[in-house]
Amino acid sequence: MRVILAEDGVLLREGLAGLLQRFGHAVVAAVGDVPGLLAAVAADPPDIVVTDVRMPPTFTDEGLRAAIALRRSTPGLPVLVLSQYVEQTYAAELLEDSTGGTGYLLKDRIGDVTEFADAVERVAKGHTVVDPEVVRQLLARRRAPLQRLSPREREVLGLMAEGRSNAAIARAMTVTEAAVAKHIGSLLTKLDLPPDENDHRRVRAVLAFLRG
């Protein structure tokens, strides 16, 4: 894949670039600020953008806001955000955009380079990959609309929001895949998400979870 990387720390930026190249990806631009990121994407849109949240000049949420701006200017552009904390307002806005692959991972919780590389590839393919701690904080902030779901259904939906497959959910919950499918069918009904050939109900359920 062709990757544009935005990270203000030189050592970390070079390390991430080397890691991505190790897994066979081409880092077509590695920049240290938001203007550089926006210019690189405008000049040659990549297969995925990987960006830090904290960028110059204030080192608060410039990278995350830039990711949202890029999704508006280039609909469907896969974006994976790396952060040391959860910026809840902008994180929810980014994750609610279902036009392309999206990821939000906490740097301190990435424990394996293969896991990180897998997340990059999944986001590039259009999937949503969210750190469980991000899910927990967003859920704690916006829980009310999910009250129709049973505790078991909320657990399934939380695992869906982490990007897990039915098989992975079944393993995590120690149940059968058939039981997981039944829970998903029930929660989709309770969230008023009928079958629609123009929409991906699983993605819409996850978005409802993040909003709710």
Image: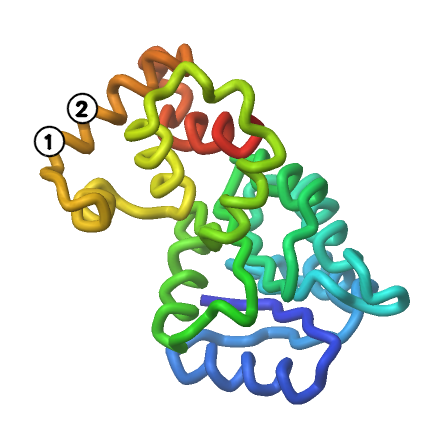
Look at label 2 and name its amino acid: Lys
Label 2 SS: helix
Residue 7 at x, y = what percent?
69, 73
In the rendered image of this protein, does residue 147 appear above or below residue 84? above
Q: Is residue 74 visible?
A: no
Residue in the foreground of this view, choosing between 74 and 8:
8
Q: CA distance from mark 1 to mark 2?
A: 6 Å
Question: How many numbered badges does the structure rendering display?
Answer: 2
Local secondary structure at mark 1: helix
The answer to whether marks 1 and 2 mark residues whose Cβ atoms lie closer than 8 Å is yes
What's the residue type where badge 1 is placed? Ala
* Residue at 17 percent of width and 49 percent of height: 171
Quarter of the view holding residue 14:
bottom right
Q: Residues within 10 Å of mark 1 (few under 14, many from 20)?
A: few
Give the residue number, with chain letter if any, for mark 2. Answer: 182
Point 72% across, 81% down: residue: 9
